[in-house]
Every structure is written in C-alpha cells, then in structure tokens.
Amino acid sequence: MSLILNGTDGLSDVDGSASTPAIRGTDANTGIFFPAADTIAFSEGGAEVVRINSSGYVGIGSTNPQQRFHVQGTTAQTRISVDADGTSLQFWKDATPTFVGAVGLSTPGSSDQSALVFSTYNGSWAERARINSSGNLMVGASSTVDSERLNVTQSGQFPIIYANNTNSSNAYGIRANLATYFFNTTSFLFDGIEFSNLRFRVYSNGGIANYSGNDVNLSDEREKKDITLAPNYLDKICQIPVKTFLYINQTDTQKTLGVVAQDVQAIAPELIDETDWSENADGSKMRLSIYQTDLQYALMKSIQELKAIVDAQAIEIAELKARP
C-alpha cells in the first residue's frame, strides 16, 4: 500500500480527520490522523476505529481509552489495566459505564499480587475466587486450610456445593477417586467435619465410620404405599449360613463375619440386588449386594416368630403343670 501525505507542508501542520486522514493509503478514507496533541488515531471507511492517546492507552471503539487496552462495544467494555496494583482484565457494562468484574493479579485497588484473582463489583470490589501460585483454586477464601486443590467456603446457610446432573438416561453425581491402591482404614474418600469434630468418614476400603446411633432411614407412613404384613422369615433366616471371609483385595488378615450374597439369594432372593460395580458403569462388573436394612427387619420378624413359638410353648407348659 502506498502512503500519501494529505497536505503540502509536511506532517507538522496536517492533523487530518477520520474521513480525511493525514496519512492514508490509496483509499482516501483509510489511514492515520492526529485528532489531539500526542494522539494518533486510525480510521477505516471514514470512521475512527483505533486510538492511541498521550498516555499510551490504546482504545478500540473508544475515543477516550481508560486503561492500557480498552475495547468498547455498544453495551459492554473490556479493559486491560497495567498499574502499580498489578495487571487486570476488567469488564464493564452499559453506557455509564458500570464495573461488572475483573480478572487479574489482584483485586482492583489491592496491592496483593500473589495470585490470579477473580473479582466482581457491586458498589465496591469483592474478591470471589483466586488461583494461588501453587495452582490451588479458592472460592470464597483467600488461603487454603490443608494445601487442598479446591477450597469452597461460604458463610450462608445454603449448600456450599450443588451438583446437578440433568442427563435423562444415566446420571452420575460426585466421584472421589484415589489413584493409588490402599484398601485400609487410614486413607479415606470423604470426611464430614462439624466444628473441627469428625462426624462421618468413608474409608478407602469402603467402610463407613460415623455416630451410628444417629443413623436414620425415612420410614414415615406418608411416604409409603402398598403396606402389608411381611411373611414369615424364621425358617429362611435359619437356613442362611453365617461365614467368615477375607475380601480379595484386602491387605490385612482380619476376617469379616457375614453372609455371602449367593447363599442368601438361594433362600431369600428378595433380599438381594444385582448392580454394576464397575468404575465406568459399563456393565463389566455385575455383582450381588444385600439389602442390609431389609435383612435387619427379616431378623426382627424372625424374633417375633420365635417369641410367638415361645409364648405358645409357655402356655402349654403351664397347662401341663396345672394338671393333677
């Protein structure tokens, strides 16, 4: 592209305009002009598109850039600030304009440059999240508690985390994965802590530790239907063998007392469920499980049946004793 000086006495006395730039290409409406002292502007099609002002600020779509790099749209702006407080990418809205948020080495107005900070503005700046120099993400917190990779803190009464899966076929929630094999009661998948007191824990071997006296199952009649008395279970329970065993991937030698699902299935199949225990739920590890609560109530029903037998025998014994 050839450059043509729009004047006869040199650049010093030719400022030009957006429609008639001082320095232009073969298109008379495209080029460079000087709208004010120490200011350079670039025009296209007779309209200003970029400006560099006397402070060295660059404005795209703005004739009055407010930061080092300022992009102005019709209803929103993006600005990059480089100053004593650090570097930040700022977001603005409407024509006023109004701060919306920022991402940078600090919250605007703060000299803390130790992390990448995400901030919002609603009358004043507020930090909402940060990624520190170790790559840990904190939401609602400015420091980690135990070098955790993710810290979500909140002071309100509402849930800290809400996981919502809207898949209509198969849906999964939150998964905790330990990449190294442990199968013990030292490593754990989940901790539930209240006021520095451990209340609930899921160990790497699948064991659950909690204050069992506080366990509850929803049992309100208003949540049930088709309520009938259970059949007899004493004979069935007496046929189920109780065994001791080790799990295949168990590392210690402490045996577990319990039952084998296949034994229970042969006698009381209603107490058994078959589900997929594979990591990706691809059907590759179909296994039998026991409805433990149902088994508990089957035992309760058996005790009731035993008591009925004992009571009947007690009456017979009393009658025999009463005979002359």
Image (spheres, rainbow, N blue to C red):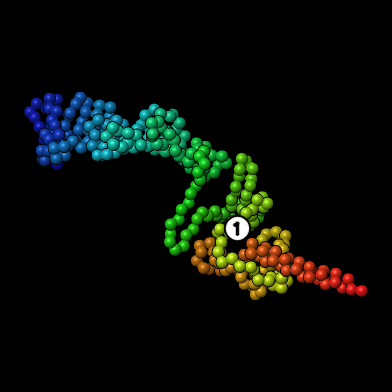
Quarter the C terminus occupies? bottom right
Name the residue nearer the viewer: 247 or 172.
Answer: 172
Could one spot residue 178 in this view of the protein?
yes
Q: Residue at x 61, y 67 (%)?
A: 228
**Which image quadrant is residue 35 in?**
top left
Q: Residue at x 48, y 42 (%)?
A: 137
**Which image quadrant is residue 82 in?**
top left
Name the residue nearer the viewer: 124 or 84.
Answer: 124
Where does the image place residue 290, in percent across and percent down from the top left? 63, 66
Q: Residue at x 64, y 56 (%)?
A: 207
Name the residue nearer the viewer: 13 or 224.
Answer: 224
Amino acid identity at mark 1: Ser
Q: Residue at x 48, y 41 (%)?
A: 139
Where does the image place residue 123, in percent across and percent down from the top left? 38, 31
Q: Is residue 7 left or right of residue 71?
A: left
Where does the image place residue 300, in percent across and percent down from the top left? 70, 64
Quarter the N terminus occupies? top left
